[in-house]
Image (spheres, rainbow, N blue to C red):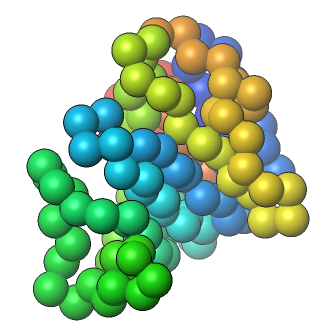
Amino acid sequence: MPICLSTAATVVVAVQAFTLGWTHSIEKVRWEEDWRVEAGQLVLDAVRVRGHGAGMEPPADAVLRDGVWQWHPRGVHAELRLTRSEHTADYDWCEPGRGCRPMAAVLPSDGGITLVRPCGAEPVDGR
C-alpha cells in the first residue's frame, strides 16, 4: 500500500517504508524516525536523536551509539499530522534506495498541516 501525503493537494509516494528527518527548532538537534506500512497502519520502527534537550529526552531503553540516541518504540498510527511552518526548516523525506530530500520537493507546504497516511485509509478527521 503506497503512502499518501496531502495538504490541499494529494501526492502518492509508492513506498512501503520511509524516514522522516528534521532539526528541532529550539535545540537545533537532528531527529529521525523510521516508518513502514503494515495492515493499513503506519508503524514507527525506530527513532534516532543526535542529542537531547527540551522535550527530546530519550526513554530509559534508548542506547547511545556514536553520539546518537536510538530506540525502537513500535508505535502504530492511522496517520501523521506534520505542521510545516515558514519559520522553521522543513522535514526531510527519505526513501530506501533514493536517499533524502526536502519534503517540499515531494509536496510543497500550504502553511498548514500535511497528512501522511497509507493510501486508501480514511483520514482521521474525514479530510
Is 33 positioned to the left or the right of 76 in the image?
right
Left or right of 7? Residue 98 is right
Residue 15 location (% of width, % of height): 77, 57
Identify whether 28 is placed above or below 73: above
27 over 123 or under it: above or below: below
Q: Give x and y (percent) for residue 60.
A: 15, 86
Q: Is residue 110 or residue 89 the one in the foreground?
A: 89
Q: Residue at x 13, y 49 (%)?
A: 54
Q: Does residue 75 appear to the left or right of 57 in the view shown?
A: right
* Residue 122, image x, y percentages: 51, 40
| Vertical placement of residue 24 versus 87, above or below | below
The reply to whether residue 56 is in sight is: yes
Label tally: 0
Write the residue at 48% across / 68% down.
43
State whether residue 109 is above or below residue 94.
Answer: above
Residue lying at 42% horizontally and 56% vertically, measured from the top left: 31
- Which residue sits at x=42%, y=87%? 65
Corner quadrant of residue 58:
bottom left
List the single residue furthest toward the front.
66
Is residue 79 in sight in this rendering?
A: no
Position of the N terminus by quadrant: bottom right
Q: Name the foreground residue: 47 vs 124.
A: 47
Residue 72 point in image, percent of width and height: 38, 82
